[in-house]
Amino acid sequence: MSSTTAGAAAPIDAARTPADRRHINRLGLLVALGGITMLFAAFTSAYIVRSGGGDWAALELPPVLWMSTALIVGSSLTLELARRAFQRGSLPSFRSWSAATAALGTGFLASQYAAWLSLNEAGIYLQSHPKSSFFFVLTGVHAVHLLAGVVALLALFGLAAAGRLVPGRSDAPTLTAIYWHFVGGLWIYLLAVLSLLG
Amino acid sequence: MEHEKQGFVSRYIFSFDHKMIGKQYFTLAMSMGFIGGILAVLIRLQLGFPSQPWPFLENLFPVGMASGIMTPEFYVSLFTMHGTIMVFFLLSLLPVSGFGNFLIPLQIGARDMAFPFLNMLSFWTVVPGAIIIIISFFVEGGAAASGWTAYPPLSGIRSAIPGSGLGQTLWLVGMIFFVASFTMGGLNFVVTILNLRTKGLRMMRMPLTTWAQFVVGILGLLSFPALAAGALLLTFDRSLGTSFFLPAGIFIGDTLMPHEGGTPLLWQHLFWFLGHPEVYIIMLPAMGFTSDILATFCRRPIFGYRSMVYAIMAIGTLSFLVWGHHMFVSGMSPFLGSLFVVTTLAIAIPSAVKAFNWLFTIARARIQFTSASLFGLGVVSLFVTGGLTGIFLGTNAVDIQLHDTYFVVGHFHFIMAGAGLFGAFGAVYYWYPKMFGRMLSERLGKIHFWITFVAYYAVFFPMHYLGVSGMMRRIYDPNVYEFLQPLQPVNLFITISAFVLFAGQLVFIYNYFVSMRRGAPATANPWNAAGLEWSAPAHPGHGNWEGEIPPAHRWPYDYSEPGKKRDFTPQWEA
């Protein structure tokens, strides 16, 4: 598989078997999720410290966030269906469920944007008070992570179109699903922080 | 080798080979270190000869050295950027990103890192960060000037001082690039070490260098996101009018800032939650190099291998629980402060375990005095010196007196900067044959060591005395205070020693680059070392081993076993 004389610029795969590679990729993803978790842990601790300040004010969360929540939970379900379809080897079913996931994910982003607009209409902006600042920062950083998930889904489409997604061999759908479920769970966590703490 | 097939770009620039990526990091880190060294020389120029004109410097820095005299604003930028460049772009990049990438696959018997593409991406993410940091010297207002710790409000209000403007913005952007790159690297380290060890290489058979890099990877992944979060919030405060860190009632000139209710201390918590693990991100690899080097040149198994591994883990864990010791004077509750004293002093235990294990490894050994082993012994010396002053500073009652004085500057230049740097130098002398297939000049190496060692003590030891005498850490001109004027001869002595220290590094740079072409050709195992990396050819190609990857039959420290003909048994021999 690999030797010292490989003159081409292609990377040498240090994994000895495809199963090795799969394990490595999954572990790499989990470790990356650990890093993202620490990012949001840092935000949370900043949130808790800052909420002790005298100028902390409550913020009524826009109701459209419930729609966001429904969309992101729904998107995790459709992606799970897509992943299982892929494992069964049913590519057409995989394609339609993952298309539904991308649509729901984009819908989530739109719904979050609507939440921002509805706050703005109520005269609440990023710099209005500390809780609004945190609201925009946390939802914004989370949206960037979800956007990365949408990009991963699009990449999956590209791979599928190029015939490079092979059921039983390709692990990319599972990796994308793990990431997607994580970002969904992260949203539930952030919603809990924003509505229960301070 | 069929290197002809491979174009210049794919081989030297966008390479996937962990060894080439490691060398790219070397080049970047050494260039940044050289710049950081020049900044140090300029800092010492001001402290040794306060406000004396140096007309030729005006050509280089027309604003900061107008008519050749250093302005206070420029001085503040200098020490800010000296710290930033040295801590992140030299002392993190060289031992961790450089040696980590170069050594981990060789030491664990892997063809490459787990994610070669991510590895390349990580290097090409830190390059723009480094360029942005350097460019910031030449923008309006000059480089960032709020210290390497970037405490708000100074770093949070763009109009506070000249360096708080575009310079500070670029600092934050550069750091975000650095954090992104470093966390990608850490991920690669952890996954590679967990998954790609060759047959027979149990975790408890890994060299201590790899153990250190493993823990460093975890530390980086867990601590750097806190800095990313802080940097993002600070950017919002600076540019979008939020008040995460900025309190009410700040006047800049006659203008009242609109911020309200923010807590500057919050930044300190976020910063030091990264900042203290970062100290060990720098220190642990140096400890690992030292263990490997001392074992080889003492021809002795490393003393207390298991306790060394546990000490690395203990230091890594404790490093997350001590950040408050940087904040004793911030007005924190004395009770909380006492807790941080306890966790801080607890680090003395695993640290002492390491120091004593090194001493037991050295004791009554017939040491081969090579450049590498001299630098390894240098690490032990600096580590003990800096560790002892750490006990002073870790105790809040004493720290409140010594905080923000030159005592602190002396302390961390010994323990973190010095031990980290000496460890990296030792590692270069030791592994250079594997990097370039040639030997460094031992004669120049020893000259380099003795200049560096003596000059290092001459520069930083007297700083403890300055600090106890009350000289402030970031003072531009100590002579403005009458009580500091008698210290001027000490400052002059330090400055001259600093010039010598800098000049000594030129010997190293010359040796490093000239030996690449003219050094004596190296054999595969020039030191008769037992570690797995020495089973690879003298100048390994992409993929590291020509045939099968050798299995590990033992740990890498089998030296001078009684009853054996050879005084070492390589790890790859049954």
Image: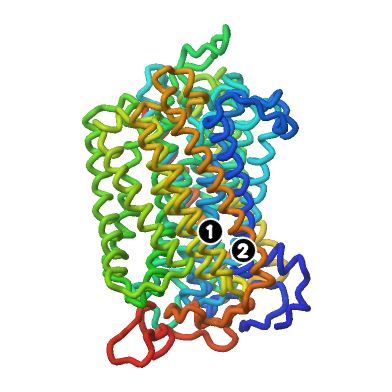
The kind of residue on which mark 2 rests is: Asn
Q: Position of residue A191 (x, y in %)?
A: 44, 37
Q: Amino acid at mark 1?
A: His
User: Is any atom of residue B388 visible in this view?
Assistant: yes
Q: Is residue B573 left or right of residue A162?
A: left
Residue B221 can be seen in this image:
no
Chain name for mark 2: B
Q: Earlier in the sequence, mark 2 or mark 1?
A: 1
Q: Work out which quarter of the rendered image holds the N terminus of chain B and state it.
A: bottom right
Dots 2, 1 in contact, CB < 8 A: yes
Residue denoted by label 2: B511
Q: Is residue A19 left or right of residue B438?
A: left
Where B210 sits versus B541, above or below?
above
- Residues marked 2 and 1, same chain: yes
Circle 1 residues within 10 Å: few <14, some 14–19, many ≥20: many
Q: Position of residue B295 (x, y in %)?
A: 37, 72
Query: Which residue is found at the position 26% from the left and 59% from the top?
Result: B353
Q: Position of residue B446 (x, y in %)?
A: 51, 63
